[in-house]
Image (cartoon, rainbow, N blue to C red):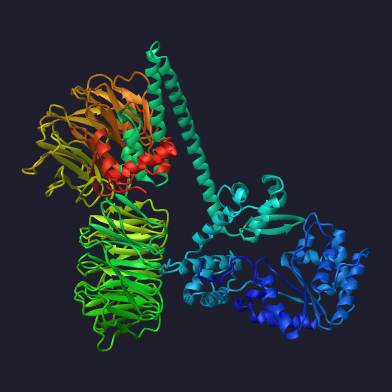
Amino acid sequence: MSGFANPFLGPQPYRASERNRFFGREESTRRLVQGILSWPCFVLFGPSGAGKSSLMRAGVIPLLEEKHEFRGVHVEGWLASHSPLEWLVQAMFADLGLGAVPAGMRPDEALEEAVRLAERRSDRPVLLYLDQLEQLLLPGRDPEQTDALLEGLVRLVRGPIRGLQLALLLREDYLGRFRERLRGAAELLEHGCRLGPLTVREMAEVARRLAASGTPAQHWPPHELRELMLQVRVPGQDDTDEAEVQAAFAQIVCRALWEERAAGNVVRGPVAAEPILHRYLDATLEGLGPLAADARRLLEEHLVASDGSRTLLTERQAQAALPPGQAERVLTTLEGTAVLLAGEHHGSRYFELGHDWLARKVFELRRERLRDEASRRQLEQERARWRRLRLISVVALTVALVMGGLLLWALAQTERARNQSLMSGSRELLESGQSAMAMKLLLEVRRPERIRGWAALAHGALARSTPEVTFRTPGGLNAACFSPDGQHVVTASPEGTVHVWRTDGTGQPVELKGQAGVISAAFSPDGQFVVTASLDGTARVLRVDGTGQPVELKGHTKPIASAVFSPDGQFVVTASLDGTARVWRADGTGEPLVLRGHAGIVISAAFSPEGQRIVTASFDGTARVWRADGTGQSVVLKGHTREVVSAAFSPEGQRIVTASFDGTARVWRADGSGQPVVLKGHTREVVSAVFSPDGQRVVTASYDGTARVWRADGSGQPVVLKGHAAQVQSAVFSPDGQRVATASGDGTARVWWADGTGRPVVLEGHKGLIMSAVFSPDGQRVVTASWDGTARVWRAEGPTEPRVLRRHVDSVTSAVFSPDGQRVVTASWDGTARVWRADGSGEPVVLREHAARVQSAAFSPDGQRIVTASWDGTARVWRADGTGEPLVLRGHAGIVISAAFSPDGQRIVTSGADETARVWRADGTGEPLVLRGHVGQVISAAFSPDGQRIVTSGDDGTARVWRADGTGEPLVLRGHVGQVSSAAFSPDGQRIVTSGADGTARVWRADGTGEPLVLQGHQGSIRSAAFSPDGQRIATTGEDGTACVWRVDGKGEPLLLQGHTGPVQRVAFSPDGRQLITAGNDKTARIWTLLSIPELQRHLRQDNKDCLTPDLRETYLDEGKARAQRRFADCERSQGRASS
């Protein structure tokens, strides 16, 4: 990188030219020099990657040359095509300046001649440094040639020859074989030592010193390095300072980290080594050029098992798997870069992946490849069919006059093939998290009402959290935030670009130029200016419209970590790595006020709400409160045991909350009096902490993967927001304090209810770490900034959500609409039924008389009454408005499981655990008619539309159709395995749908003839099934927490409704068929809207303003490059954006 000098070498060994940065081996160097000087031959052995070669090249040899005037002969590898002894002789003649090797002389004679000539030329001592001797023991090597070399070395040692020293290096796993070859000549192995890997403690200190020696110098905290080195310790070793480090991986990770930080990509908190190694693997494979694909397939197919673990690959297997003649280059590259580790067993070389992290990456690459190959095969088949049919249509056009029917057929087939190709592309994009682009493809489908599965796929796309608009920039993004009026977004990039965008995505962004690597950007309170913090140590104040010259605030001597305006917009406070904060006039006039006192990096600075004070956070473990005019002494908030990385005032300005790498947040009085409230519970570093708008709560973000919402006074237990798969970078409250937005290293942001209820809205689609997620001033939107180079604006409420009815305190077991669709009645195990307005407004009417759980509730046909069934053994008939006393129906000998009115409202049918169903007069007079036949509980009972029949379902695996007057024998529907949980008639009475514990729903002819149609797709048992009012659809619910809507003929994909957090017990359509209501064990009922095709198309257009990119148009619409670019430009112009 231009202007930068990275002190980390990666996996390559150190050489003499890097000796000034060869740290951590001073004692080993001294000991090895002493050994070489003391003995004719000294052996250095150790594990692969321990640094033997680096120790010799950068430590021992330079010292021997400078202090003892040694001449050196270096052999660092042994070519298989050359005799080892001849190779050594050639090196001696060349390195010692002895001329050409005498012609006709045997190698052993030439060796003696070289020693004789060296003694005659100079009395300076000679070091024979022979590295990688294990290569001589590899399969395929001529053992006689190896023995000849060893015999020559033995003669040199036995001489002994004054001033000639041997240093032999080899891997310790070959030491045994080497010893066997030297039987009778033990002199070569008589003296030596082992070089082990550096420990975590040692390597952390080495990395710290190396980072500081780079250009520019970087200061890495010891605790950060310790945690990083623990991540690259030798597998299986304990989590201690004395664990050994895999030096090659430590160097790789540190080299990449240094580059990222030099480029301005500063991330607070611990560094994750695994993603760096993943990127390193990608870069290594790319470096193989044309062989990259072969190398990748070798890793994927031969070096990971089916469960993702590492496997061994022999050299012979590798040669067979790679193109002829290319195995050596691929294996040498992968071994040299530490991607592969090599070993030897019984004369055969083998390889394995260098780390479990690499194995996980390779395993994921393999899974992605297999998925992609399957998707591409299907897509290519459909596109080929599309092209074929399009050709047919062209041919047909030429004969249209005589065969007009063929033309119509060909055009129809072409359209069908095109639509299927678009459907496959949409599925592929949805699966890869690109829901916005999937929406665009769905809108390209012609006549979607005729396409099987289109509506389900459209609902599925709309059910994903999709950004309203995406802002794309070169390089990653460090920050993005809304303007005070919410109309604009500013983004900051380490590449030095700052852009101001319209929040609605229209128009061209304003680029604010003249920046270096930008760490942060923030609007002024009036939204007219932006202040940036840069790596070059300068803050800049720029007009949002890009006019005029920026005001440059210069004075810091190191990068600026943050810059923000004062509440009145007249001042700017900056925090810098130079250990100071500075207060500047925003117009750049006058001299800045310098706030000095911290003993470490100042990472953040913020004004108090009234603007009279400033709080700073520092890596020295303290926060400080200063008067903004610089007078008086600062108040030091001291108590954290590690770096303080953020500090913020409470809304009233009397308290401060700090976040620290010590795993705690603390709430202090701003005047420093009293003891802080310690918020303790995170298991790793806390990286941010802010107050809620009312000051009563604090939300923290941590590298333990959680955010937590605490009472600011420390009382009670925090609400733990858990679900991210990696560190949480930031967490903030919404303006109303009801929600929390988090940003994570897992590439997602999430919007949570601050009280922890419900499911979070998951904002997914970014392809890199998300640095921040911030609410708009009205709380309706969230903007995220990611290292993938994009900022995205999302609706904070996520995709269209069902209306949730929350009041029950236990499982909701049934829910149905009133006949006019204006109300809903629910039943719950909390012992109540509740009557709600279907729009969710107002308070529900509570029906509270049962002495036990209420299992079901249903309206009468006129909507004036409700019947409930309860575990107290009764059914009760209530006025729907809750007035008066309910009518009690007693007679079942156990719990009553269901109750429903007849179509004329004159009768009620109930089912119970006493193996019966009973038909009652709705006014309670007379004795009920008892229907017996089931063996076990009768789970449900319902009338046919004409009221002449009743269908029941039971534990005995059957559904039964009875005459409502009890005459005759019931028709038994058999086929389910296990309990039949529900049964219902179709609106015309010709069919029955049942649901079962066997995970199926079945559609039967009501007369029992023929075979049922089986609907299968839930994971686990199906709890209920119901027909739509037009009889064309069936809704089911399951223990998997979902509801599905199916075509009654079973064709196409079902529409999947997700949102409940537990099993869903019951489902019912609204009278107009446009809504569904579900009842769940999560104590809620939910009302879902089922959109028509035009409504779906409208939402697909409106929910996202991005345009289908040219590359995707080429891939999925089969457009040529020029047409794809033109159509993309047309779309951009329609959004008020000019296309480049």
Say which of 1087 and 461 sits in front.
Answer: 461
Residue 777, by quadrant, is: bottom left
Q: Seen from this angle, which residue lies furthest top?
A: 402
Would residue 851 be seen by someone viewing this image from the given angle?
A: yes
- Residue 397 position (above or below residue 645): above
- Residue 318 x %, y %: 68, 49
Query: Residue drawn 58% across and 71% down?
Result: 243
- Residue 1038 x %, y %: 33, 40
- Residue 1116 x %, y %: 42, 37
Q: Is residue 83 left or right of residue 62?
A: right
Residue 711, by quadrant, is: bottom left
Say which of 969 and 195 sits in front.
Answer: 195
Query: Residue drawn 11% across and 49% down?
Result: 842
Residue 741, by quadrant, is: bottom left
- Residue 239 position (above or below residue 349): below
Q: Is residue 275 left or right of residue 1126?
A: right
Say which of 282 and 623 sits in front.
Answer: 282
Q: Is residue 193 left or right of residue 795?
A: right
- Residue 601 x %, y %: 40, 78
- Residue 764 position (above or below residue 42): above
Say which of 892 and 575 sits in front.
Answer: 575
Would residue 1040 be seen by someone viewing this image from the given angle?
A: no
Q: Seen from this angle, which residue lies furthest bottom?
A: 632
How many numbered marks, from 0 up?
Answer: 0
